[in-house]
Each structure stands twice: as C-alpha cells, then as structure tokens.
C-alpha cells in the first residue's frame, strides 16, 4: 500500500505534457524488475488498454534505469512516436527470466486498466532472446511478439508456433549470428505449424540497424492488430520489413521531438558532450538518436544537408 501511494503521488507530480505520465519505478515488484512505466493520454478515459513490454539488449543492462532510455520504446515516445498503450520497459542485470517478466506484467495488471487479451512483447539482441523465451513459456498470455537479432534459450519451443510471432534478423549481424534465429525457426518447423510465423532474414543488415524497428509506426500497428480473442490466432501478414522501411524510421521525428520533456526525464541529456566523433557505418539519423537530438538540429549546428555523408572519425557538433 505504501508503494502504491508513492506511485500515485509521483504520477500526480509529473508535468502535463503530451507524454507526461512516465516514471521510473524501483523496488515495486517483488521477484520482478525495476522499470519505466508510461501511460498514454487516453488512459484516464479508457476502460482498458494494451500493454507493450520492451526488453532491452545487453548494452543497457545494469542498475541504472536511465540506460534503458538510450533506445527502444520509451526513447521512441520521447521522440514523439505515439503508442496508445501502457508501455513497460524493465531493466535486467543478466539474461531475461520469463517468470520475472511475467511477475512484472501481473503487477501492472493488478494496478492499472489492462486489456489482458492484448499483451505484447518485443526486444532485440538479449531482448530478442527474452522475447522468444517469454513467448515460448507463456504463449497463451502473449497476444503477439516481435524478436529481433536474438534467439531462444529454452529447449521447448513449440509454444512459439501457437502465437503470432515476427522474427527479424540480419545476415550481416556479427554480434548475434543469424543462425541463432535460424535455429528457432527450424524448431518451430519441427513442431509442425509455421502458419503464425513471419521470418524476415534480411540480407546485409547488421546488428544495430534493427533498433530502428522500435521507431516505426507499423511496428505498433502490427502488434495491436492481434488479440488473444482472435479465432485461431492468425498472424497479420499485411505488413512487411525492408531496408527501405528501416531507412525512414527516424524521418518524422524532427517536428515532434520534445526537448523539455527529454531534459526532465533524462538528466544526462543536459550533460552530453558538445562534440561527437562519428563511428563506422553511422549516419546523421543514427547519430541523432545516439545523442538525443534530431537530424534538423545537427544540420543547423554543422551547416549540413540531410544527405551529407558521414565517415569514421569525423568530428561534428551535437549541442
């Protein structure tokens, strides 16, 4: 009761912005994880809302929740992506444990207006492993899942054949080889039913490139098109993934980027360095995401055009 009172108090104290109801929750869920919680504008009037669970990769692991804001669903919200759902973004110290993820989901269900027929999980890298492990263990509770550049830790994977599952992996991934997803797909095939599986084995796409999926509007439209109430639980195949789609993932954020909100939620934003050294393969768009800014701002600061090419070692101004 004390923790619930504290949660309500913190929510009431948040500023009234378009994505105001977001907070860091530490020590709330016994047997769960610390997490970020987001409630959309529609929450107050809604009877029930879906839940989106974002599972991060290894690089965001640890005991500093601010790390979880570096990319993913909450970062997409900070940049203006509209997600009409309760978004939960926990932080793990090591590999994701399905029981702990579900303990967190159950806590959210107990305290908020949740549509239990529309619970979705998505993640990449270690989070891709976590996504498939959770979906395999609880296919009767997960309405749909998206797993990127991951794999599966469990041996029993037939549960993955019973829910809509979208697996995405690049053939140029040097951190988590594409064979890790291939093995999952082979296991689903061995179970005898691939009718609910979408597997995009993307030629020439590397590991980090797939982080762009979290910023696409179609990602959430695809998830929300599934429900546990769907007869036979068919997968929606009207959406697709391609290099061209990934290329435009950040294109519509310049106008919606909320600097004041980012400063309020993420203190390191104010402390970031003035200049940035470009790493191999980076573009203006990926640099903007890395530094919590926009392509338009980078162009203004550096006299660039949006088509200006980057190269490894180039020094550019980011604030």
Image: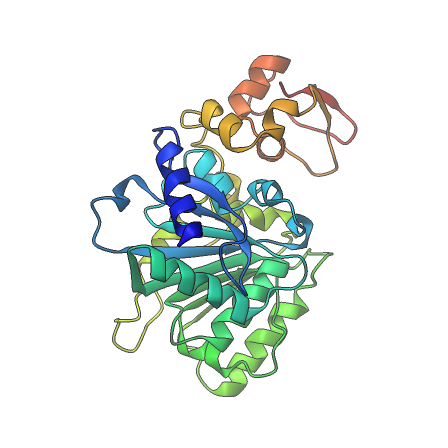
Q: Tell me: residue 269, above or below residue 93.
A: above
Q: Residue at x 67, y 36 (%)?
A: 282
Extreme-right residue of the structure? 313
Query: Which residue is found at the position 55% from the left and 71% from the top?
Result: 133
Q: Is residue 140 above or below residue 262?
A: below
In the rendered image, which quarter contains the N terminus? bottom left
Identify the image quadrant of residue 176.
Answer: bottom right
Residue 102 can be seen, yes or no: yes
Using the image as rendered, state which of residue 3 and residue 15 is in the foreground.
3
User: What residue appears at the point 49 percent right and 36 percent down from the top-left corner?
Assistant: 250
For residue 267, side relative to residue 29 (left or right): right
- Give coordinates of residue 79: x percent, y percent: 46, 33
When asked about the image quadrant of residue 140, the answer is bottom left
The image shows residue 134 at horizontal and vertical percentages of: 51, 70
Q: Is residue 239 visible?
A: no
Q: Is residue 38 above or below residue 137?
A: above
Q: Where's residue 301, x and y in %?
A: 60, 14
- Quadrant in the picture for the C terminus: top right
Asked which colour scheme the image uses, the reply is rainbow
| Residue 268: percent from left, percent from top | 62, 30
Is residue 31 left or right of 222 when viewed as pictured? right
Whether 112 is drawn above or below 216: the answer is below
Judging depth in this view, the residue of 247 and 313 nearest the camera is 313
Report whether 302 appears left or right of 315: left
**How many numbered marks are there?**
0
């Amino acid at each position: 009761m004390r923790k619930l009172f504290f949660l309500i108090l913190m929510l009431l104290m948040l500023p009234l912005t378009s994505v105001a109801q977001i907070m860091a929750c530490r020590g709330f869920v016994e047997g769960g994880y610390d997490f970020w919680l987001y409630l959309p504008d529609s929450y107050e009037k809604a009877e029930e809302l879906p839940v989106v669970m974002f599972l991060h990769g290894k690089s965001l692991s640890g005991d500093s929740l601010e790390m979880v804001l570096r990319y993913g669903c909450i970062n997409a919200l900070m940049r203006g992506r509209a997600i009409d759902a309760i978004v939960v973004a926990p932080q793990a110290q090591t590999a994701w444990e399905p029981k702990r993820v579900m303990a967190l989901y159950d806590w959210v269900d107990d305290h908020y207006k949740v549509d239990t027929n529309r619970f979705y999980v998505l993640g990449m890298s270690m989070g891709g492993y976590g996504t498939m492990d959770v979906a395999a263990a609880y296919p009767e509770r997960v309405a749909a899942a998206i797993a990127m550049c991951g794999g599966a830790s469990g041996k029993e994977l037939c549960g993955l054949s019973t829910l809509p599952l979208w697996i995405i992996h690049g053939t140029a991934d040097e951190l988590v080889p594409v064979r890790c997803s291939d093995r999952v797909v082979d296991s689903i095939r061995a179970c005898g039913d691939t009718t609910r599986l979408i597997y995009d084995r993307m030629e020439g796409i590397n590991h980090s490139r797939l982080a762009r999926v979290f910023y696409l509007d179609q990602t959430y439209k695809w998830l929300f098109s599934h429900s546990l109430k769907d007869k036979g639980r068919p997968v929606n195949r009207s959406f697709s993934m391609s290099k061209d789609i990934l290329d435009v993932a950040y294109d519509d954020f310049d106008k919606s980027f909320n600097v004041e909100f980012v400063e309020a939620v993420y203190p390191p934003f104010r402390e970031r360095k003035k200049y940035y050294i470009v790493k191999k393969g980076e573009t203006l768009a990926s640099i903007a995401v890395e530094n919590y800014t926009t392509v338009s701002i980078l162009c203004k600061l550096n006299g660039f055009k949006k088509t200006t090419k980057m190269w490894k070692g180039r020094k550019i101004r980011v604030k």
